[in-house]
Amino acid sequence: MTPLRFAMFGTGFWSRFQLSGWNEVGGLECVAFYNRTVSKAQALAAEYGVPRVYGSPEELLDNEELDFVDICTAVETHAALTKMAAERGLDVVCQKPMATSLQEAETMLRICQEAGVKLIINENFRFETTFRQVKKMLDSGRIGKPFRARLQFVTSFPVFDNQPFLKELDQFMLTDVGSHVFDVARYLFGDARSLYATTARIHPDIKGEDVATAMLKMGDGVTVLCELSYASKTEIERFPQTFAFIEGDKGSLELTTDYWIRETTADGTLAKRYPPPRYTWADPAYDIVHSAIVPAQANIAAALRGETLAETRAEDNIKTVRLVFGAYDSAAENEVLRFE
């Protein structure tokens, strides 16, 4: 198999983990980095054996033979970099959140569709070992038809220590974590018919919200409560797990601490632990999140080769984007939003 050649745009905090994920998948070759601060790109290139580094995205695109680009830069740069790549006929893999607004995301998708290239969002939470198992258990029908669910990402993990730029975001919790959790809700229960959300800022030294709560009414009637927080002190630190409690008309599923899933029906409770695989390059503090990069990028690589449709293709992920920015509108106006 001829390796897919790609360039990575951005060499910040997440880039090394995405690059390690591509290396784990295999059949891909990173041939160049772009980063605004060239010295950062040079350091990462030396570590990973990437042959060329550029301080200009245009120069990189004009000088490299590529199959796709992997955009791992700040969200405000996504649209421009996507347009540059699409105009050159290159498929685009883009970090979440896709864009700074729903309108911008729709424009990115339209540009790629008109250029005949793929746009895929690098969204990994739905690929976590635990959520793949929860989906299998839901599909088995053992707990019957779900009617209510709770998804919780609540933690006091000091995320601003290793990613200080997050303090400067005007919109934080919903774009950063809500993008993940809303996508999980859609993966498990389908698309939303309505949404109501609230937000709060607890840390005094940040610009955006660090707490958000959203209630989604899904198309098949399931009510999903999404609780998001970087300001919650819990008995057992939960980072980076997302917990779940799902009620069905024949039983329930609970995803809880240390990757345990409990399935309760009339026959009793079955409990089993579903830990993620471990990789030497992953940060133990981000264990399940980093391990999910590999199956997420394996799905993307297969889609880039035309072997399958990417689960997180932009045509689908834009529905998650709609929920994220709809949640901000709902919180600002204290109103329920309804989707056709």
Image: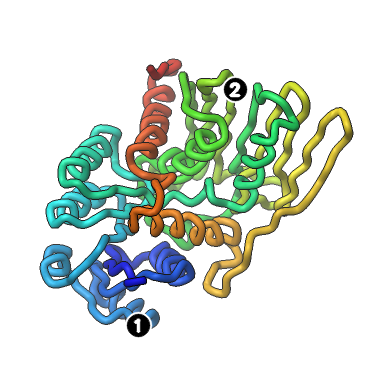
Label 2 sits on a secondary structure element that is loop
Classify the position of the C terminus by image quarter: top left
* Label placed on residue 222: 2
Q: Is residue 316 above or below residue 92?
A: above
Pointers 2 and 1 in contact (C-beta within 8 Å): no
Residue 270 x, y percent position in the rendering: 83, 42
Q: How many marks?
A: 2
Amino acid under disc 1: Gly
* Nearer to us in this view, 189 or 75: 189
Amino acid under disc 2: Val
Toward the right, the furthest residue is 267
Instruction: Using residue 2 as the reference point, say whether residue 261 is left or right of it.
Output: right
Q: Which of marks 1 and 2 precedes in the sequence?
A: 1
Residue 160 x, y percent position in the rendering: 47, 56
Instruction: Using residue 186 as the reference point, say whether residue 78 is left or right of it.
Output: left
Q: CA distance from mark 2 to mark 1?
A: 48 Å
Label 1 sits on a secondary structure element that is loop
> Which residue occupies 36% across, 69% down?
28
Q: Is residue 166 visible?
A: no
> Which residue occupies 32% across, 72% down?
2
> Which residue occupies 52% across, 48% down?
125
Instruction: Using residue 78 as the reference point, say whether residue 238 is left or right of it.
Output: right
Residue 241 x, y percent position in the rendering: 62, 50
Classify the position of the N terminus by image quarter: bottom left
Q: Is residue 79 visible?
A: yes
**How packed is label 2: few (under 14 Cα within 10 Å), some, or many (20 or more)?**
many
* Nearer to us in this view, 193 or 308: 308
**How packed is label 1: few (under 14 Cα within 10 Å), some, or many (20 or more)?**
few
Q: Is residue 110 above or below residue 83?
A: above
Q: Which residue is mark 1?
A: 49
The colour scheme used to paint the residues is: rainbow
> Which residue occupies 40% across, 50% down?
308
